[in-house]
Image: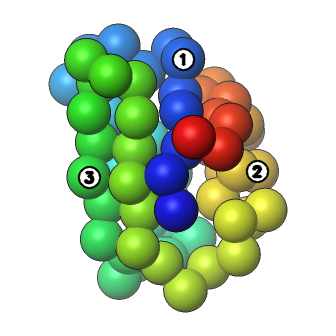
Amino acid sequence: MELKIENMTCGGCAKSVTNAIRSVDSDAEIKTDPAARMVEIKTTALQEAILQVLEEAGYPATEA
């Protein structure tokens, strides 16, 4: 899945996003691009679960 995260603007933000996603699926493959404010995730977790943990972490996301 590809998500747009408007307030992911730096490497620190990208690390926080990655940690949030890993809390749902520790085996997820995650590619973050803070410059484009995008994250690509290969996971077995439900998209709703990913969106929820990102929201809770302060990084609300939308489908890209």
- Circle on res. 6: 1
Is the residue 55 above or below the residue 41 in the image? above
Q: Depth check: give the residue in front, 55 or 35.
A: 35
Is the residue 13 above or below the residue 47 in the image? above
Q: Depth check: give the residue in front, 19 or 49.
A: 49
**Residue for badge 2:** 52
Residue at the image position 57 percent from the left and 40 percent from the top: 64
Q: Which comes sooner in the sequence, label 1 or label 3?
A: 1
Across and down, in percent, residue 5 comes to: 53, 28
Q: Is residue 57 visible?
A: no
Q: Which comes sooner in the sequence, label 3 or label 2?
A: 3
Direction front: furthest residue = 64
Residue 35 quadrant:
top left
Amino acid type, label 1: Glu
Q: Depth check: give the residue in front, 17 or 32.
A: 32
Amino acid type, label 2: Gln
Q: Residues within 10 Å of mark 3 (few under 14, many from 20)?
A: some
